[in-house]
Amino acid sequence: MPLPMASPRADLVWLSDKVREFGIHVVANRGAGKSRFLGRYLAFSDFLREVPTIVFDNRHTIDNFLDKVSRLPEEQRKALWPRIRYIHLAGLGGYVVPLPLYYTLAPDEDPLTTADRFVEVILKTEPGFSRASIQGKTAIENIAQPMGVELIQRGWQLTELDRLTVKIPPTLKVKLNPLIHSETQRAIYGAAEPGIDWQEVIDKKQIVLIDYRQMRKPQFALVWILDYLLSFIEARGPDQSPISIIVDELKAFKAAQVAGDDIFFEFLDVLVNTTMRGHNLWLTLAHQSMMQFDERVGEVLMSMDTQIIGKAGSMRSAVAIAQELVKIDPYKIKRYRPTFGQESYFESMLDRLPAREYFVLHQEPVEFTPGDQIREEAYRFQKLPTFTFLLFVKDSEPKQFSIANLEPGIFPDQTVVPAIRQKLMQRDGRKIEDVLAEIAARTAAPVQAKETKEPSTAKKLPVSTKGTLP
Ligand SMILES: Nc1ncnc2c1ncn2[C@@H]1O[C@H](COP(=O)(O)OP(=O)(O)O)[C@@H](O)[C@H]1O
Ligand SMILES: [Mg+2]
């Protein structure tokens, strides 16, 4: 593999492949330079090294990456564009990258498996559902699974919900309707095929920039595309070539996983401790403050082998990080305290009363307490200048590095970058009207509505996410 060329500075940072397998946690206050580091350096390095890379971000990491590429000499740029994919989760300028709710990962996939992915995600992302009693949950599964199976067997998507004969209770409909509410939504979730094929991303060594800027409620879309990616990774099997996954603003995913911290903790715990390690994911998770998450989530994040710490936003966050990272030195000396010896002497022979003379007998060290040491380090985190980070890699000495001299004064061009994003959406996405026409064509032929038939009996029909009625 070619060496990374992203950094003109040899002293910047070098993270070995071995270390990447155990994850990077980046925490720094807003404005500290996280996105600049992730976009111009980390994502860019992975991309140049031809490691398939998936970036989740709501603006600055993506813009820094695209800006960086746009400033390369034309010859290089030309070679790189085909390897850059861009997906705006809300669509852009009349184009969408479809993410149908029913898609297959194997040609012979059981429709129930296909249907279940969507059911699992709505249960995770809809507050009303996850808090529902076990009974309520089962009830939802009992409806949403056969509903999905029937749609799949007919070659339909959720967009054809109203054509089904299965009765959907209003409580469930209220949750499903927003997904197919607008034309954009219908095109994204109702298309026959996903607009991104992860195997192709791997084969062509692409970078996929997943953007959710300016979305009022990116929750479902984010969790859905991540679920698509992780389902693919699971199906691909363990111990494969590395895939880099870079998440800027991890908080967005927590917001997505309902209010409940438990669900987010479980999600992250599985991602970091099972999926990442078993599937050779180079996972990078960035966010602003430890106070954004509960303690258990904090523990998972701090357990990642590489920690990149930038200017802390609050003392509490800084202390929480320091508590995990500072190696307490029980012998670290703060000062010496003299202990005194004394000796009796007689001022004169006339005065028989003894006086005392004191002298320093010994300098006794006073050690810093663990609390002192943690606080000292926490202050250091708070005082880090913009663009300066501390790098803690497991089993090696901490290092400080700065990205201040990495293309100083160069920031994402506000004319060029938006134009690139639009062009990429046009190149790889689909026109909303085309997808809608395709959806309309699916049901254009008059359909003999099935008599209220138990969907389970229809299970043996051929499976397809495309095509017309069986
Ligand atoms: N166009 C610009 N001109 C000058 N400074 C900028 C520009 N864009 C970003 N910056 C500065 O770059 C710094 C790093 O930004 P960024 O990497 O987005 O931080 P983070 O992701 O940690 O919030 C910020 O302090 C910001 O003020
Ligand atoms: Mg940022």
Image (cartoon, rainbow, N blue to C red):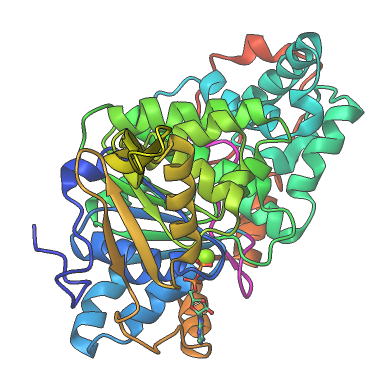
Q: Residues in magenta?
A: 90-106
Q: Which corner quadrant of the image does residue 66 belong to? A: bottom left
- Is 204 left, or right, of 99 in this rendering? left
- Is 219 left, or right, of 428 in this rendering? right
Residue 205 in sight here: yes
- Is 122 left, or right, of 47 in this rendering? right
Question: Foreground: 60 or 318?
Answer: 318
Quadrant into which the C terminus falls = top right
- Is 390 left, or right, of 449 in this rendering? left
Which residue is at 18% across, 60% downward? 49
Residue 69 horizontal/vertical position (percent): 32, 79
Question: Foreground: 327 or 110?
Answer: 327
Q: Which corner quadrant of the image does residue 363 belong to? A: top left
Question: Foreground: 356 or 78?
Answer: 356
Q: Which corner quadrant of the image does residue 301 belong to? A: top left
Q: Is residue 148 above or below residue 434?
A: above
Residue 103 horizontal/vertical position (percent): 51, 37
Residue 411 horizontal/vertical position (percent): 44, 85
Q: Is residue 104 magenta?
A: yes
Q: Is residue 240 magenta?
A: no
**Magenta residues: mostly which secondary structure?**
loop
Question: Foreground: 278 or 314?
Answer: 314
